[in-house]
Amino acid sequence: MKAIVYRDYGSADVLRCEEIEKPVPGVDEVLIRVRAASVNPLDWKVMSGGPFIVRMLLGLGKPKIKRPGVDVAGTIEVTGKNVTQFKQGDEVFGTCRGAFAEYGTSKSGTGVKSALVKKPDNVTFEQAASIPVAGLTALQGLRDHGRIQTGQSVLINGAAGGVGTFAVQIAKAFGAKVTGVCSTRNVDMVRSIGADRVIDYTQEDFTTRSEPYDLLLDCIGNRSLSACRRILNPTGRLVLVGAPKDISIAALVASLTAVLVLSPFLRKKMTFFIAKGKPEDLTILGELMTSGKIKAVIDRRYRLSEAAEAFRYLEEGHARGKVIITCEDGGEL
């Protein structure tokens, strides 16, 4: 089968489209014929290796993870003998190992790399592949950590990105009044997906506004914690789900430490988290898409052999919504 692999850390130049052996699913796994996958910032951050402390986990000299890709949508090809909830031919979406390939495996159960559910009939493979990491982050950030309530005033910093586009729509589905922060070129798009108000960050610093917010979901991390807290209501919440791509590891650790140490003593709560791969939450997101309450914002599509180009584009930091990779012979998407 064709798959995207890399054997050294580095830029998108280390990616290769090669013929490798098709994976064999374990007893608790399924083999997925990949129809579409989506690229996340985490994919190229892992590929680059990051700072030394990160490489201690990923492999010091050579990467332990050699096949990138997590978000997937496709068709079940083979099921392990202990798998009961799926059968051959089922159309599914969720997460798997090495999604940038013609085939990938996913464990039947829960976890960051093992959440899989059936795809709704009226959702395309491309739309479904855009959901997992970004959609789960937006849903869990707003609902579980932001404790969003109907009628609240919510600000999404980074409203045009993968997480942000889902967050705007999910917040509206919860009945919130939503303000999105984005660049000039994305103002109309963010407004079109439901934002009640849009702030162009090239013209205005959202942290200087006098209007207080009940919840701030920060997908960018380009403003200080104190500045973000300043625009919250007395009992408001700041949820961090992103950081600038050029932030140093020291600055990142200092920021996260401040959140952990200070938040318990403050009325304005702060938190950061990593999304969990919960099949029940994927089901919720699929239902929201089926009902039309949320839609996938897809910026660009690339063929499997063009994966390096997709990575380069995403790394530029200007993608609107999601970047999709499809297999050349994947058929109608």
Image (cartoon, rainbow, N blue to C red):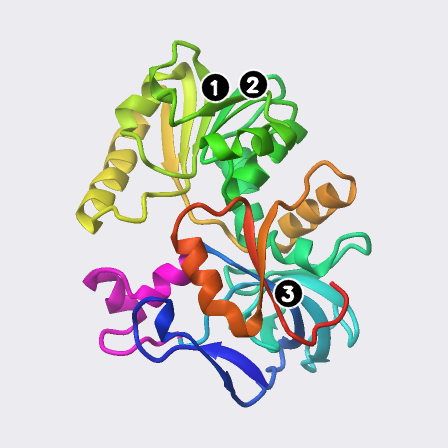
* Structural distance between the alpha carbons of marks 1 and 2: 6 Å
Indicate whether residue 39 is drawn in magenta.
Answer: no
- Main secondary structure of the magenta stretch: helix
Is residue 45 part of the magenta span, yes or no?
yes
Residue designated by label 2? 152
**Image x and y of residue 144, in percent:** 52, 37
Magenta span: 41-65
Identify the residue shown where x is 78% and y is 77%. 88
Amino acid at dot 3: Ala
Vertical order, 169 against 27 (above or below): above
**Looking at the image, which is closer to me, 266 or 43?**
43
Residue at point 61%, 78% (across, down): 103
Query: Depth-wise, is mark 1 or mark 3 nearer the camera?
Result: 3
Say if mark 2 contacts mark 3, CB within 8 Å. Answer: no
Q: On the image, numbered disc 1 is attached to which residue?
A: 214
Question: Would residue 250 be found to the left or right of residue 25 on screen?
Answer: left
First reached walking from the N terminus: tag 2 or tag 3: 3
Q: Nearer the viewer, residue 67 or 260?
A: 67
Q: Is residue 294 above or below residue 119?
A: above
On-image quarter of the N terminus = bottom right
Q: Count numbered badges in the picture.
A: 3
| Residue lying at 32% horizontally and 29% vertically, measured from the top left | 264
Report the residue that reaches farthest toward the right. 121
